Amino acid sequence: MSIFARVKDAVDIVGAARRYGLEVNRRGKAHCCFHSPDRHPSLSFKGRVYTCFSCGAHGDVLDLVAHLTGAGGPLGAAQELDRAYGLELDAGKPSRAEARRYAQERERLEAFAAWGKKACGAIADYCRFQEQLKAACAPETQDDEIHPLYAEACADLEYASYIYDAVFIKGDFQTKARFYEMHAEEVKQIEQEIRKNIRAG
């Protein structure tokens, strides 16, 4: 196991955030230290990562501690946490393979975070569009025939609302990652449909 992975396994990210000056509330949120002003806590901690959906900041305990302490990147943060928590790890220079794996992991996280913010917006736009379609096609009386577009909008809105709430609002990092792996192409099609409807409107 790499030095980076050993530190991340040993150190709780919320505990580290509090140790280095952030006030994390019971819901696992804090005022974001990556942008200012942050009037309402927008930095969210779930599992071993943090995400700010206001400014897009995201990462793990090494990224957070590097930022809060100016420790000089992941290696400096690992050394700082090793010292602060008495982990007695060999937090010297990592091997090239370890450094490469960590860099690849960071690239995947960057790509996923960028996709997640964009996808969340697309799903929210899709929900709004289906709500408008549902309202426009709704029967005026109980005796009116149900318009096919109304039934379709009801079903699509129910599904999209569930995804938005279960994945993007309440889902942890692993939930979002699984959704990304399985439904990235589906979200891309939703984005294309939204753009098409905006142009048509």
Image (tube, grey):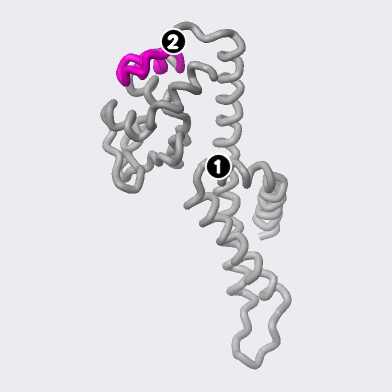
Q: Is residue 73 or residue 149 the one in the foreground?
A: 73
Measuring 37% from the left and 42% from the top, which residue is drawn there? 42
x 58%, y 68%: residue: 132
Residue 133 image point, x, y percent = 63, 69
> The residue under label 1 is which amino acid type?
Gln
**Vertical position of residue 195 compared to residue 143: above or below:** above
Work out which residue is located at the far bottom of the displayed protein and give it.
Answer: 143
Depicted 52 relative to depicted 87: above or below: below
Q: Secondary structure at mark 1?
A: helix
Q: Which residues are magenta?
A: 74-89
Q: Nearer the viewer, residue 74 or 81?
A: 81
Q: Determine the secondary structure under disc 2.
A: loop
The front one of 87 and 133 is 87
- The residue that label 2 is drawn on is 90
Instruction: Provide the residue designation for mark 1.
Output: 174
- Give, as a three-letter code, the residue at label 2: Asp
Name the N-terminal-most of marks 2 and 1.
2
Q: Is residue 33 left or right of residue 143?
A: left
Give the crowd class for mark 2: few <14, some 14-19, many >=20 residues within 10 Å. Answer: few
Q: Looking at the image, which residue is at 32% across and 45% down?
A: 40
